[in-house]
Amino acid sequence: MIALNIHETKTHLSAILAKVEQKGETAVICRHGKPIADIVPHARKNRNELHPVMRKIKLDYDPTEPLSADEWPEDLR
């Protein structure tokens, strides 16, 4: 963890971001010695995993099979 004041952060922002990105470090920005913000590595979400709610959905039909004429809603026939 790196602790920096606002002036240091403005002056060295590119280098700070490089450390956060490449080394996974966290930077804490302080005002008058008190932390006010964190710069942390971005946590990417794994888009290959389904949301837990989506895992619970069960279909009782094959959505790839075409519908017969009677199965279509009347306003779409």
Image (tube, rainbow, N blue to C red):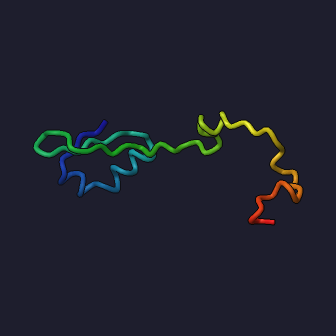
Percent of width and height locating residue 53: 60, 36
Residue sitting at x 39%, y 46%:
19
Q: Is residue 73 above or below residue 32?
A: below
Which image quadrant for residue 59? top right
Percent of width and height locating residue 40: 37, 43
Which image quadrant for residue 75? bottom right
Residue sitting at x 58%, y 42%:
46
**Quadrant assignment for the N terminus:** top left
Total marks placed: 0
**Quadrant assignment for the C terminus:** bottom right
Percent of width and height locating residue 47: 61, 45
Residue sitting at x 18%, y 44%:
30
Which of 70 and 22 lies nearest the eye of the viewer?
A: 70
Q: Is residue 57 left or right of residue 41?
A: right
Spot the residue most to the left: 32
Residue sitting at x 84%, y 51%:
64
Which image quadrant for residue 37? top left
Which of 43 and 73 lies nearest the eye of the viewer?
A: 73
Which of 63 and 47 lies nearest the eye of the viewer?
A: 63
Q: Is residue 52 above or below residue 21?
A: above
Q: Is residue 6 above or below residue 26?
A: below
Percent of width and height locating residue 15: 34, 52
Q: Is residue 6 left or right of residue 17?
A: left
Which of 20 and 56 lies nearest the eye of the viewer?
A: 56
